[in-house]
Image (cartoon, helix red, strand yellow):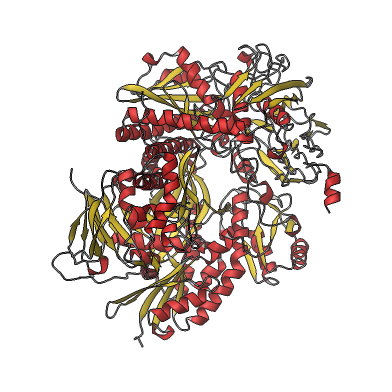
Amino acid sequence: MSESGWQVGIDIGGTFTDLVALLPSTGDVRSIKVPTQRNDPVASIRAALAAADLSAESVDDLVHGTTLVTNAIVEDRVEPVALVATEGFEDVLDIGRAGRQHLYRLDLPPRREAQVPPERRIALAERVDFTGAAVRIPDTAAIDAVVTQAQAMGIESIAVSLLHAYANADHERAVGAALAKAFPFVSLSHQVNPETREFERTATTVLNASVMPIAARYLDRLQREVKGARLHVMHSAGGMASPDAAARRPLSMALSGPAAGISAAASVAASLGLEKVLTFDMGGTTTDVCLILNGAAEISTDSKLAGRPVRQPMVAVESIGAGGGSLVTLGTGGLSIGPQSAGAEPGPAAYGRGGTRATVTDANAVLGYLDPAKRLGGAIALDVAAAEAALAPLAARLGVGIVELALGVQRVANAAMVRALARVTVERGVDGRQCTLLAFGGAGPMHAVGLAREFGIAEIVVPRFSSGFSALGCIVADMSYTQQQSVRMLSTGWDATRFAALHDDMLAALMAPLHSHGHGADEIDVERTALVRYVGQSYAVEVPFAQPLDLDRLGRDFRQRHHEIYGYATEEHWEMQSLRMCALVARRTTFGPLGIPGEGAVPTSVNPCWFEPAAPHQTPRYDRDRLPTGARIAGPAIVEDAWSTIVVPPGYTLSSDAMGHLWIREDAR
Amino acid sequence: MRNSVDPFTVEVIRHALTAAAEEMSFVVMRSARSPLLREAGDLSSALTDHKGDLIAQGRDIPIHLGVMSFTVKKFLERVPAERLRPGDVWFLNLPEVGGNHLPDVKAIRPIFLEGRLFAFAVSLAHWGDIGGAWAGSYFAAATETWQEGVRIPPLRLFTADGIDEEKRDFLLANLRGPAEREGDLMAQMASTRAAEGRLLRLGEEHGAATLRAALDRLDDLSEAQMREAIAGLPDGVYEGEDFLDDDGPNGQPAAIRVRVEIAGETAKFDFSGTDDAVAGPLNTTPFVAMAAVYYAIKAVAGPEIQPNGGCYRPLEIRTRPGSILEPGIDKPVVGGNHETSQRAVDAIMRAFEKAVPERLTAGGSTTAGLLIFGGTRRDGAIGTFYETHGGGEGARTDRDGAPVVRVHLTNTMNTPAEIVESEYMIRVDEQRLRRGSGGTGRHRGGDGMRRAYTVMEDGLSLTTMFERRVIAPYGLQGGADGAPFRVTLHRAAGGSRELSGKENLALAKGDRVVMETSGGGGYGTPAEEQAGE
């Protein structure tokens, strides 16, 4: 049995559950991957702990990244809720923003239908104006009537979203207090998302309410399972939160899984002193990319999940529907990759489980990148002939050889990902070519160099634990709480007293869960971001600032950022649209050097691999776990671990550092 | 010349070009000043080649996207390529220069690769005011284009040295809300610069010759796809018509007629049977008619085809000089852009009902549903609140219509009530579904909505510009029509009246304007519905 004091990170993905554990007293590290038990996440955690030979008693801290909330939303398995809205605005979810998603598709519904059906919408006669002044105060009888109506609906979770509640929440609080006596789950819009635009705020609040019962039950069960260990969950902004806080605002876990990977990436980027990093997490069906500047992931507060608005602080991950298992199709419009995928069953043809349709992985198999002698994760045997058979009809139709097609599939897949990389950098005014590409996930390391070349990036890092990176993210994440709130104050009419009150209230709310966890003020860092715009703009530029606020400096920083992003700036006055704050307790998890001794790298085998259509290269293969510190390998080369394959084409050189990270750089030309 | 670029490079370039066009719209939406752009998204972006043929477009507004290529081609007739320089940004809005109406101002930047003109980036944005007789520049009684606002011929507003301040000031002096307009034009300039950066990088990477070869290949692919799509429609001659409600406060319905001939892989659209030009601002340009055809054929036959210069080669489109769709340059056109254009689409859809009813939706709110409140904003600046209103979508053979959505040629968004109230002297009293407004049928049309505005100050003006008040959204295959639009003005001083779809009037504090948008048409006879239950 192991000794106590382990810090454990567990990420439950769709196919695999990853665990990374560290015992700080000795520096021992364990890293494990077990199949996810689809309908029983708690059992997956139990299995991962058992596989790592860790008992519940030996674990001090367990941090968990989960797709529970994500999947509930994406698969539409959320709980029914009722909505309390200002009278006259009960149909806000039907009206939305009136746009449609597809310009030319008459067959598809223009957008997702309202989450709350008409019979569960409750009107409350009340009104607050945009300044926060109460225009019509709801009387007790009206509030009681709301509770009575809701009780007849047979639901356990309720969302309350009143007009302009971000400016004055008194009415929401009054209704919330009355509802709390009758219902276990109440979501108030000014708590979930205190920002302007009624549709987005209401939709976000309703979505939160609809996952609340699911999250509460799960977290409760999990806490019992891990007994005395301190349990935390990853939230979408890349930090960890207490189960209580997560249960109150479960929508904050909507991107828990990807955020854990980004948290690991941010930590690695900071430890390596990399200023600009693009993450590249390619899985079986999707690829996620995210920009990390100065060791911090970019945060978005205006995203959508499965067609529903989610206005919560989330790592700004751009996701595209192309991964290793994505199908390659050829129409009159040309070659395309995804979004349909071969799924886990039958999977790519190369996996020999009956798949016959060409996928990206099949192209990799044809090019020789996957080791035919090895079994993926010790289980899946490679069938190159099946991969060739799957690609052959497409090659014939295009009039090219199979190898040429396979190389083409790689380029087309990369082109879609380049678009995603461009989006996350353009929005920040960053030249993506100056970034380092950090590749992880199952297929990320295999495609990293090709993608980097297509985008113009010269340096790639495949970090230690790259195939269990989200689990690593769980144990390096800071404990943090983030909130964003509408401010709307002009630089020419600055009300320092009002701003200070708003700032202090928000700070107190963010600090409360940290204090209750025993963290003193001296341990807590606060990050402040002003969302600033010119008067008349709708979208704001993020400008970090420190207290006490220096208005002139904020204005200067704003103009500079505006110029970086849009290419121009004027000397006009500006407006602070919103304030975002993050209170965090840094978790200074450190890993010792990997320090694998040895002279040079020794290949385990040599196989032909194709990097250009003319001829294959005899390409040595190396075992990552036996690659000595400081090894340098000139491409072409393949480096493998149990779960992923790193491709180093000719013209690139790989080197391993003391921490176990692998660097791939373009050779000087 | 042999087309030697490999199919994979073509795909890589296609992605890059589309990304560039999408980035342009992002820049305008994020940095522009008028709510019409930043909240409603009434803007579009495109890239054309050096001749003006479309090479990529954003995910924007079909009516805009359809005219972009004509804008550049007509621009080149006035401004020969020899006069263009790197760093130029030309602004224009003339309807006869491949345009649609005066408020839609286009910024055109020539892009040079290897020292030669290679492409144009075009940013189109609807300016909240372009001058003229009435705030918001929708003058309902207009009988001439010159009453509708400032007419901007191709004007080199930016050079490599920066903005020409005299030209800018001349322009802004003629517009209401100059500060807002200046912010908008800077945003358009910035968006074309972003596209230029993308194209220069592509040029460095692939070289102009490879890029050109890829564009030719993409054109050919789209053409082949469009031919295949048209071949999938049954051959024949199909006629369709639809009617404008009126062209002004006392106007009469006027017909838009189309004769569609599908023959193998080609399609002809002949609008010659359309009524003569009307007196009021419901005329439009032949370019808008073509944009309507482009939209309709894509929606009916090939929604996933990449739109570019090749895509529309198999089409032949004819309009008749002197008709509503080709009225001559002196005629007013401001409403025709989004009203008459939708009539053209509806006429085409009615024609296709005889060929492929299962592919169509019944009539929807094919109108901007526009209200413009002119006056002073809360911050004291002059500003117009320009709001389009969506209605119910028509039903289809396999589903009900959606409630409150923009259909066909438009896809602008609404302005949230919380934004309206915080920026304008207007209160939004309610916005709810207009229940029962969708037409009945085997599948029901979507419901429209009801939004009520109360004016909080004296001195505001109101403009209406909407259709489907007289002629209701049609049912298809026996489905019932949707409820028509209704806008009612309740005066604070007492009395109410229903407003027509083309009016300018003054408002007083306490006046209430109630907008009820149309429901969608039903699909299939209700009798079938009963039989099926």
Q: Tell me which residue sits at (41%, 84%) in the image.
A: A55
Q: What percent of the width, then of the height, locates residue A7?
A: 37, 76
State the quadrant of the N terminus of chain A: bottom left
In the image, what residue occupies the spot 58% across and 24% down?
B315
Q: Nearer the viewer, residue B444 or A83?
A: B444
Direction bottom: furthest residue:
A1
- Residue B450 visible at all: no
Of B61 and B456, which appears nearest the observer?
B61
Q: Quadrant of residue A569?
A: top left
x then y, percent, for residue A669: 18, 43
> In the figure, is residue B239 to the left or right of B319?
right
**Front residue (pair A519, A160):** A160
Q: Residue at x 40, y 70 (%)?
A: A379
Q: Quadrant of residue A386?
A: bottom left
* Residue B273 percent location from the top left of the image: 72, 17
Quick one: A377 or B480, which is closer to the camera?
A: A377
Residue B194 in the image, given as x and y percentages of width and height: 40, 34
Is B42 on the left or on the right of A47, as rendered? right
